[in-house]
Amino acid sequence: MNKALTLRINGARAVKLSFVKDLPDGNLFIAEARREIPFDIKRVYFVNNLANPKATRGKHAHRKLEQVLFCISGSFLLHLDDSKVKQRVKLNDASVGIWMGPLVWHTMSSFSYDCIILVLASDQYDEADYIRDYDAFMRLAKGRTR
Ligand code: T46
């Protein structure tokens, strides 16, 4: 799955981690800042206990924050929107992350019962960096220069 994941979204792309197969004793995945992760990591958070099949998370974009999202257990759907193009990606491979720069509206849904989402972020938490209104996002994203 996700062997050659190509995104059509401006400001998002797939990231592939290297990993060591230590079978039968497990796999070890490696994410290093400025290597697989294209920024210095200032925050790590994860989301688990996604047992509600109707749960949706996200529904926002960021003004400056960069993040890479991984599904390190189970699966979920990541819905991306750059104001012109929308794309839905199924994440179910711990070695594949999605880098998202600023002004990418993202929503997560369809979580498997065992889903765990790991996020590496370029900055500390700041609610002022969130754009939680879709119309405001559209105005800002349509005015972007790249
Ligand atoms: C994102 C997606 C992928 C904090 O206090 N500190 C934190 O570092 C984070 C991430 C959240 N919070 C608080 C803010 C809210 O009161 O936790 C609560 C839930 O956050 P939110 O509704 O933003 O959660 P998600 O899953 O919708 O979004 C999160 C990140 O917040 C966001 O940056 O891009 O995951």
Image (cartoon, helix red, strand yellow):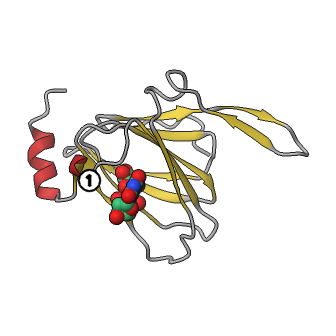
Rendered location of residue 27, percent (x, y): 78, 41
Q: Identify the amino acid type marked 1.
A: Glu
Q: Is residue 27 above or below residue 50?
A: above
Tell me if 72 is positioned left or right of 134 in this view.
right
**Whether residue 116 is visible:** yes
Q: Is mark 1 within 8 Å of ligand 1?
A: yes
Residue ID at (28%, 35%): 10
Rendered location of residue 91, percent (x, y): 54, 51
**Whether residue 79 is visible:** no
Residue ID at (29%, 48%): 126
Rendered location of residue 108, percent (x, y): 41, 60
Badge 1 density bin: few <14, some 14–19, many ≥20, Cα 10 Å: few
Q: Nearer the viewer, residue 121 or 10?
A: 121
Rendered location of residue 131, percent (x, y): 20, 52
Residue identified by numbered label 1: 127
Q: Nearer the viewer, residue 58 or 121?
A: 121
